[in-house]
Image (spheres, coloured by chain):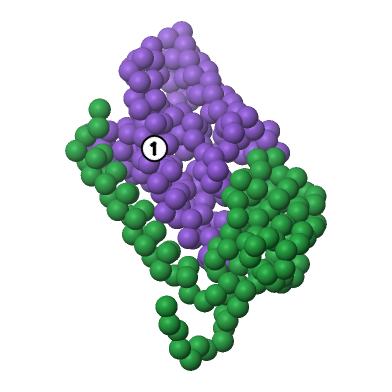
Amino acid sequence: MPYQNRAKEVLTADSVKIHTRRLVLLSLFLALGIVLYVVETLFLPPFPLPGAKLGLTNVVTLVLLIFYSWRECLYNVLARTILGSLIVGTFLTPAFYLSFGGALMSTFIMIFIFNRFYGKFSLVGVSLTGSTTHNMVQLTLAGALIAHHWGILFQAPFLILIAIPTGAFNGIIATYLVKRLPLKTSIL
Amino acid sequence: MLTRYDKALIYFLLLLASLTFAVSVNFANIGRAGEFAISACGREVGHYSLYQSRKVKVQGCLGTSVVEISGSRVRILSSPCPRKECTARGWISKPGEVIVCAPNEVVVKIVGSDEGKPTDAVSK
């Protein structure tokens, strides 16, 4: 239903229920994303390669893409990155710009691939494009903002190699989640 | 679960990785490593020789990082950053190689000794 018509809509008990349900579920997804972000940043041991991590938060992005639309997905990513970095304590530092830029760009790419090519690519393929974009954008931003030197781009092959297993892993987790979650698209 | 296009994407990424690796190997060997530069928190700290084993203390944004030079290689020995990714990076020795510590904003990069000078001849 278009946004401007919503005010005229008669608030029946059912529509209130659906709106509340949607609000609560989206908040839960946001909370899930933030918790994964914080846990991954603070508690998981780092890979022996700078900038590489599992990217479990991407699972939330993929699940939202399936159950909702690109809009909810993008809002989730924006809020999650900002709130997560506030909790971790990196807000407005170079590390924040790296993670913000990487998350935003990879989300745009994943939304594009999902809307145009889902069916040809499975969730694993969508996740792979996202993880690779994330790593490449982070590397470029790190070269521009922190190192001021393009020698850092020599790490690109290792970051691409790391992006393949992590992206596939997240895609597989998201596939199972979508199968098992007791959600129906009609009542979201 | 994997479709045909997924597999094609994986092969494409592997190809991309090996291509960029080939390019980086070919370009990383230009020039001979002679010295390296340290910058911290946005300013240049200085240039140091690779052939003199020593430890350098660098004041970063968070605290003091220790850079160790030994056997014409450099590494970050200790750092106040939370995830210790810069110390996990290990030794670097080739021109163009960089260690970046994002939280402490310490950058160690190796500069070729004849960078910027025209070369008469190169033999390998």
**Nearer to us in this view, A127 or A31:** A127
Q: Taking the image as drawn, is residue A97 in sight?
A: no
Left or right: B37 with respect to B57? left
Kind of residue sitting beneath label 1:
Pro
Q: Is residue B72 above or below residue A48?
A: below
For disc 1, the neighbor class at 10 Å (few under 14, some 14 to 19, many from 20) is some
Q: Position of residue B117 (x, y in %)?
A: 56, 87
**Chain A colour in the picture:** purple
Q: Residue furthest toward the front?
A: B71
**Nearer to us in this view, A153 or B54:** B54
Label 1: element kind? helix
Of the 4 image quadrants, the one containing the N terminus of chain A is top left
Name the residue tied to disc 1. A165
Residue ID at (71%, 50%): B77
Q: Taking the image as drawn, is residue B23 in sight?
A: yes
Label 1: chain? A
**Count of all numbered marks drawn on residues in the image:** 1
Of the 4 image quadrants, the one containing the C terminus of chain A is top left
Quarter of the view holding residue A173: top left
Q: Is residue B71 above or below residue A7?
A: below
Chain identifier of the green chain? B
**Nearer to us in this view, A152 or B120:** B120
Residue ID at (41%, 31%): A170
Q: Is residue A49 above or below residue A22?
A: below
Residue ID at (27%, 33%): A122
